[in-house]
């Protein structure tokens, strides 16, 4: 009886054993496992879609462009570019839902990270259900016809240097240079030496110059607006420490090489004469405004 049970156990163990890898003789190359091939991208010309009323000879091209602009653009609401927080280096988008928010733009709930009376809220990936790209992916001819309008007809909103750098890294050069309207919102803490390598918030001083450099050669930009909040962390004041000239120069100097017909910088402080003397002439208009502020994590 026990011999029968023992034999049964041995048989079951043999079934569960993993198959052994074949031994390779000297000089043999192990077999490679290939991932399934993706379908090739066709390089054939787009179909002229002559049977479609949208591309028919009787349908004016100007009216077709107006349709694209109405579907893809928005002249009022900001288009927030929201980096994913999952390490994927991807970004998402979200139309602004806080048009009347009095707080700095980087504190909008649209970015997915905010604090209220119920506690801290943090979405690792942006949630967007607007199906903005549905029109573009419906037809190759529509895509080639309208992809530029996605970038010319929106007012893009970026959160600090990370937003500038990550959007630039994924947008092809032709579309990047098609951008016309841009808004950047950020927070700096002083003194500068304490916050060189910080993850936002507050802003990373090292990445700031690189982010501004990415905007210097935008070829068709019409309007850029920076919203810069500076706080003296130790003194808990609204505005920079008056003696921290180094921090203010590090913040404002990278802006001098950005060119746009309309270029406005909103700050919560007046530029001190000592800083202005170092900067020299600037190519932006300055607007001083004190906004109410949501303290994040109860600290800044």
Image (tube, rainbow, N blue to C red):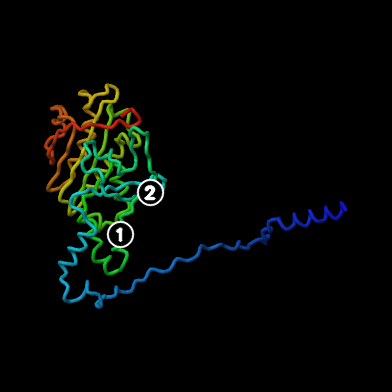
Above or below: residue 62 compared with residue 14: below
Q: Residue at x 34, y 71 (%)?
A: 43
The crowd level at tag 1 (other Cα within 10 Å; few <14, some 14-19, many 20+) is few
Residue at horizontal 20%, vertical 75%?
56
Q: Which mark is residue 133?
A: 1
Residue 290, quarter of the rendered image? top left
The mark that comes first in sequence, 1 or 2, is 2
Q: Nearer the viewer, residue 164 or 294?
A: 294
Is residue 160 something that shows in the picture?
no
Tell which of 15 and 97 is nearer to you. 97
Residue 145, disc: none
Q: Is residue 105 above or below residue 77?
A: above
Q: Residue furthest front?
A: 118
Rendering coords of residue 59 (x, y %):
17, 73
Q: Foreground: 249 or 166? A: 166
Within-10-Å neighbours for mark 2: few <14, some 14–19, many 20+: few
Quarter containing the C terminus: top left
The residue shown at (21%, 36%) is 102
Q: CA distance from mark 1 to mark 2?
A: 20 Å
Q: Which residue is mark 2?
A: 89
Considering the numbered disc 1 on the image, is that residue within a helix, a strand or a loop? loop
Question: Looking at the picture, how far across and down is residue 13, in whole percent?
Answer: 75, 54
- Outermost top residue: 235
Which is more foreground, mark 1 or mark 2? 1
Quadrant of the image occupied by residue 299: top left
**Residue sitting at the far bottom:** 51
Q: What secondary structure is found at the residue carrying circle 2?
A: loop
């Amino acid at each position: 009886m026990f011999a029968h049970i023992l034999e049964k156990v041995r048989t079951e163990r043999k079934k569960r054993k993993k198959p052994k890898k074949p031994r390779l003789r000297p000089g043999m190359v192990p077999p490679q496992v290939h991932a399934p091939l993706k379908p090739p991208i066709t390089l054939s010309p787009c179909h002229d879609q002559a049977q479609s009323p949208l591309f028919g000879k009787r349908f004016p091209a100007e009216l077709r462009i107006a349709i694209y602009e109405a579907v893809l653009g928005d002249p009022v609401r900001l288009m927030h570019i929201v980096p994913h927080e999952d390490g994927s280096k991807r970004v998402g988008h979200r139309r602004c839902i806080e048009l009347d928010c009095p707080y700095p733009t980087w504190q909008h709930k649209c970015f997915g990270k905010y604090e209220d009376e119920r506690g801290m809220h943090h979405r690792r990936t942006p949630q967007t259900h607007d199906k903005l790209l549905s029109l573009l992916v419906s037809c190759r001819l529509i895509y080639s016809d309208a992809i530029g309008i996605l970038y010319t007809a929106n007012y893009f909103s970026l959160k600090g240097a990370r937003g500038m750098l990550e959007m630039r890294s994924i947008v092809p050069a032709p579309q990047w240079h098609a951008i016309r309207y841009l808004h950047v919102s950020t927070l700096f803490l002083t003194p500068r030496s304490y916050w060189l390598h910080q993850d936002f918030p507050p802003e990373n001083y090292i990445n700031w110059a690189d982010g501004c450099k990415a905007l210097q050669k935008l070829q068709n930009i019409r309007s850029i607006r920076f919203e810069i909040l500076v706080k003296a962390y130790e003194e808990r004041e609204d505005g920079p420490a008056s003696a921290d000239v180094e921090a203010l120069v590090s913040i404002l100097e990278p802006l001098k090489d950005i060119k746009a017909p309309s270029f406005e910088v909103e700050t919560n402080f007046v530029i001190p004469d000592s800083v202005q003397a170092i900067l020299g002439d600037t190519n932006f208009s300055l607007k001083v405004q004190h906004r109410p502020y949501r303290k994040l994590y109860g600290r800044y």
